[in-house]
Every structure is written in structure tokens, then in C-alpha cells.
Amino acid sequence: MSSILVIGGTGNIGQHLVTASLDAGHPTAVLVRPTTVAYDSGRARLLKALKARGATLVYVLNLGRAPGDMNDRGSLVTAIKEHGEVVICAVGHGRSEELDGQLTSSKP
């Protein structure tokens, strides 16, 4: 089975993609901003439930950036290389353009 990395896995659509991937038996990782767990108790509970079902939580490192900054290219590239034979980007409207340059730049 292919390993799946979901970016935006705690969102309205992303959480269903993570669940479907786990249900299908894929090793599934969720890219997580540390601020998601620290400041959003609902999403923290969701992540705890996904982890209990077997999802791997991969935290954005945010080296030298504000917490939760999705433009941390190093964290994205590392997460993709280590966890994503298949990468699903379910980042909400207004955020996806921030990832465009990072993801196209991460090709080997």
C-alpha cells in the first residue's frame, strides 16, 4: 500500500480524506501545525482520535518562522520525503497558494 501524507488533514474535507485513507489500510500521515494542537481543542481531539486509529502526526518545525507558517519549505520537503508516496493537499481556500511554490520546488 502507498503511504499517504495529508496536508490540511484537520479541516472539513481533510479529516474525511485521512479517515478514508486509514479505512483503506494506507499508512497515513497528517502534517500538523503546532498551533493547531495548542490553540484549538476541537482539532486537538480530532488529531488524538486519528492518531489512535493509526495516523502518524508530522509537525511543521517552523524553524525561524512564526508558529504555523506553512511556508517552511524544509519541513514540507522533509514530510513529503519521509511520509508521502502520495501527497494530498486539502488546505483551505486562501492557504493553498502559499504551498504552491513550496511543493513544486520540492521535486527531486
Image (cartoon, helix red, strand yellow):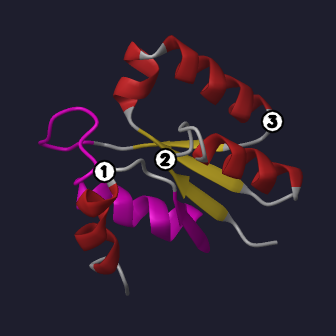
The residue beneath circle 2 is 8
The mark nearer the N terminus, 2 or 1, is 2
Q: CA distance from mark 2 to mark 3?
A: 18 Å
**What's the amino acid at mark 2?**
Gly
Give the number of the disc on residue 95.
1
Comparing marks 3 and 1, which lies closer to the viewer? 1
Q: CA distance from mark 3 to mark 1?
A: 27 Å
Comparing marks 2 and 3, which lies closer to the viewer? 2
Residue at the far bottom: name it.
108
**What's the amino acid at mark 1?**
Arg
Give the number of the disc on residue 49.
none
Is 81 magenta? The answer is: yes
Number of numbered tags placed on the structure image: 3
**What's the amino acid at mark 3?**
Arg
Residue at the far right: name it.
24
Horizontal relation, residue 78 to residue 14: left or right: left
Circle 2: element type: loop
Circle 1: element type: loop
Q: Residue at x 87, y 58 (%)?
A: 24
Front residue of 97/30: it is 97
Give the number of the disc on residue 53.
3
Task: Tell me the quarter of the picture where residue 55 sits.
Answer: top right
Residue at the far front: name it.
93
- What segment carries the magenta color? 62-89
Q: CA distance from mark 2 to mark 1?
A: 10 Å
Q: Which image quarter holds the N terminus?
A: bottom right
